Image: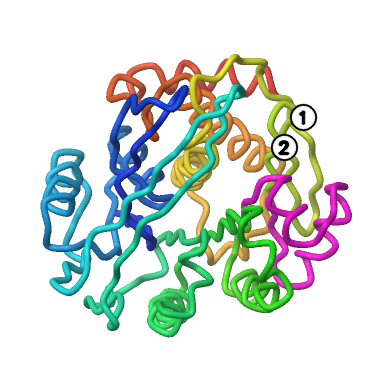
Amino acid sequence: MRRIFGIGETVLDIIFKNNQPVAAKAGGSSLNTLVSLARVDVPVNFITEIGRDKVGDNIMLFLIENDLNTEFVCRFDEGKSAIALAYLNEQNDAEYEFFKEYPKQRLQGQIPDFTADDIVIFGSFFGLNPAVRPRLLEYLQAARNNGAIIIYDPNFRKHHHQNREQLIPVIEENFRMADFVRGSDEDFINIYGLTEPDEVYAKVAVHCSNLIITAGSKGVYTYGTKHHQHYKVPIIDPVSTIGAGDNFNAGIIKALLECDIYKSDELVLSHSDWLNIAAYGIEFSSEVCMLIDNYVNTDFKARLSVNIDKRIQSVN
């Protein structure tokens, strides 16, 4: 049985529309990815840190109810579980305000015994934060040394832009740790100031040869050592885009499982492999954009296989 590990921050997302709270959801990039995977019966393991407070207890209950393995969740007494206020604009894109109070010692749980069958995903500012980075690198190095596939999502937003020059070397170190990089066109504008996908790949390929760029209604661009392809996406009127990228990541992982892609294959993917990655990613992200949740509904798995067949035809 292949295992999936997500490493990242956990927050309680309080979502506002027209300045009124409309929902409160457990969130965080890796959490969103893992919950959607668990809802299509993929066994997942969460590596995170959560306070021993009422917010943390509620989040832990949610994780357990959604079949995430919490063996590697670190609970801390000093500080509070993180809260994020997500304000949806007219396009239903979110602007965030964060409230965080972490302990001095971060991510102090046991490092899993990673194997070559495993897939690990990490990213967002959690992947750059100096307070947690030394420990994060221990997890990533252990996964890399044991042959696991590593996926990195920079999720680099405008409010990080003022520290861009200092953070680019850290981002590029993460690129080198990864076997796949998946970012939005907005991420790479904020990181490199580049809008052309080919130019972005020229930058990323120095460090990681497999790149996926999601560009909203402009589609999906995939790059590998012997591959470059653009895929179309459906035109939708989204309810919320909060979990779109995270769920595209869930689709990538689901495709890696369905296509039996392992690190031992040196990750030189076929056209069919890339097509499946794009189709699954688009299917997961399109689904979640039509919801106020950060993850797919529990009934999504019942129609996934039929929808994927249709999606492959529509994007190819």
- Residue 120, relative to residue 129: is it above or below? above
| Lateral position of residue 52 relative to residue 91, left or right | left
| Lateral position of residue 241 relative to residue 175, left or right | left
Q: Give the magenta range.
A: 182-211
Residue nearest the viewer, comparing 164 with 45: 164
Binning the other alpha carbons within 10 Å of mark 2 as few (below 14), some (14 to 19) or many (20 upward) gives some
Quadrant hosting residue 233 = top right
**Label at residue 218:** 1
Residue nearest the viewer, comparing 80 with 5: 80
| Residue 261 x %, y % | 52, 52
Quadrant of the snapshot with the N terminus: bottom left
Q: Secondary structure at mark 2?
A: loop
Q: What's the residue type where badge 2 is placed? A: Ala
C-alpha span from label 1 to label 2: 5 Å
132 magenta-colored: no
Residue under the image location 58 percent in, 62 percent down? 265
User: Marks 1 and 2: CB-CB under 8 Å?
Assistant: yes
**Label at residue 215:** 2
| Residue 222 x %, y % | 73, 45
Residue under the image location 69 percent in, 66 percent down? 162
- Residue 62, relative to residue 200: is it above or below? above
